Image (spheres, coloured by chain):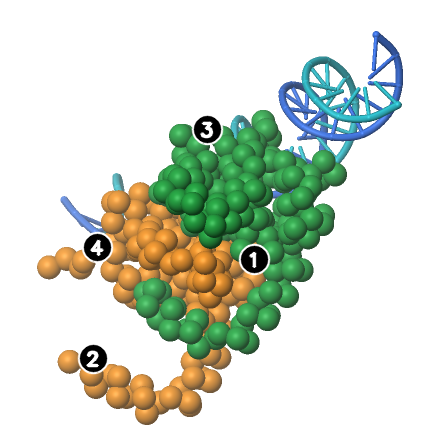
Chain colours: A orange, B green, C blue, D cyan
Amino acid sequence: MTLTENTFSGEYSYSIDAKGRVNIPAKFRQALSAESDNTFVITRGMDRCVWVYPLTEWKFIESELRELSSLASLHRTFIRNTTRYATPVTYDKQGRIQITPSLVEFAGLKKSTLIIGMVNKIEIWDPVILKKMEKANLEIDSADYDTLAEKIIL
Amino acid sequence: MTLTENTFSGEYSYSIDAKGRVNIPAKFRQALSAESDNTFVITRGMDRCVWVYPLTEWKFIESELRELSSLASLHRTFIRNTTRYATPVTYDKQGRIQITPSLVEFAGLKKSTLIIGMVNKIEIWDPVILKKMEKANLEIDSADYDTLAEKIIL
DNA sequence: GATGATTCCCCATAACTACCCACAATCTAT
DNA sequence: ATAGATTGTGGGTAGTTATGGGGAATCATC
């Protein structure tokens, strides 16, 4: 059985070059659905990392944003914050995407990066920052973490 | 690489020159549908910024205004306020549009501007004013904001 | 009608981006 | 084990994009 389209798993350690390009693992490129047209949308993650959506996934988010009313100030703020950092990127012949300088800075990316499959999207991390974040979080909610695990892991 | 037509995302930092011209990001110009005929309609935003609509989107708003009755004073006021600040503008060979002096003043535009894709339209901000507005808003409705995020972000 | 201001259109240039090719490392298959 | 294909990394170049300014055409004013 093959995995569903647009399903990403596993961890890869790649480098980001002087021009801000990062390789997308070949397996992820193969998992990308044809309708996404070799295109991802990169944006700020909720954590200090870059989120990489398949184009089709992002289009769905956009379609939900279109439903929001421009009359409500809360909705305007939400739309603004959601689309503001989002950029569509196509990968080149070598399978790399260009990370915008502002996202490189946001995620604190240096030379080496961790690329992590997150089922419906991909995360790009600086290894040091990820480790720090994990350490801080684990102490806080380890009990809740176990409860969640019991529900989900068979 | 083509997103849906008339779909704008991302943030750009451009300058407004002495003649009141601002560049429309190349990606936005490419996203503009052919029927819009290189034309946008600029008007006052609900916030202190300039709203830039693709011509086709604006025509849709106009068609809805036509449905309103000129007999109701409320409707007349609404029609008046909606159309009075709206100006169609075509971009020049270099991709710039001319912002009318009254809109420059309304949005408090100085030298440098932020251009933000808002899915179906574009916003032009003075960076300082935007930052102030964000600060003020975040304190007010952060809980509602999170609720919205949970619904929409996958 | 002449003068001055404004708008529009075109050109020039510097910075940036997308695209291309090269090569080394890794994996696959015989 | 070796050859061939694929994958990851680096850099060069042509084309595009952002920004400034000049001059003709248009409009308002006296």
Q: Secondary structure at mark 3?
A: loop
The image shows residue A10 at horizontal and vertical percentages of 30, 66
User: What's the CA distance linking mark 2 and mark 3?
Assistant: 52 Å
Please state which of the two labelled residues, at mark 2 or mark 3, is closer to the viewer. Answer: 3
Judging from the image, mark 2 belongs to the subunit labelled: A
Label 2 vs label 1, nearer the camera: 1
Q: Amino acid at mark 3?
A: Asp
The image's mark for residue A5 is 4
Which residue lies at the image location 27% right of the left edge and 65% below the top edge?
A119
Label 2 and label 1: CA atoms lie apart by: 44 Å
Q: Quadrant of residue B63?
A: top left
Please name the residue that numbered disc 1 is placed on: B47
* Label 2 and label 3 in one chain: no
Q: Which callout, 1 or 3, points at the residue further toward the start of the chain?
A: 3
Q: Which mark is residue B37?
A: 3
Where does the image place residue C18, in percent across and percent down from the top left? 46, 38
Kind of residue at badge 2: Ile
Q: Which residue is mark 2?
A: A152
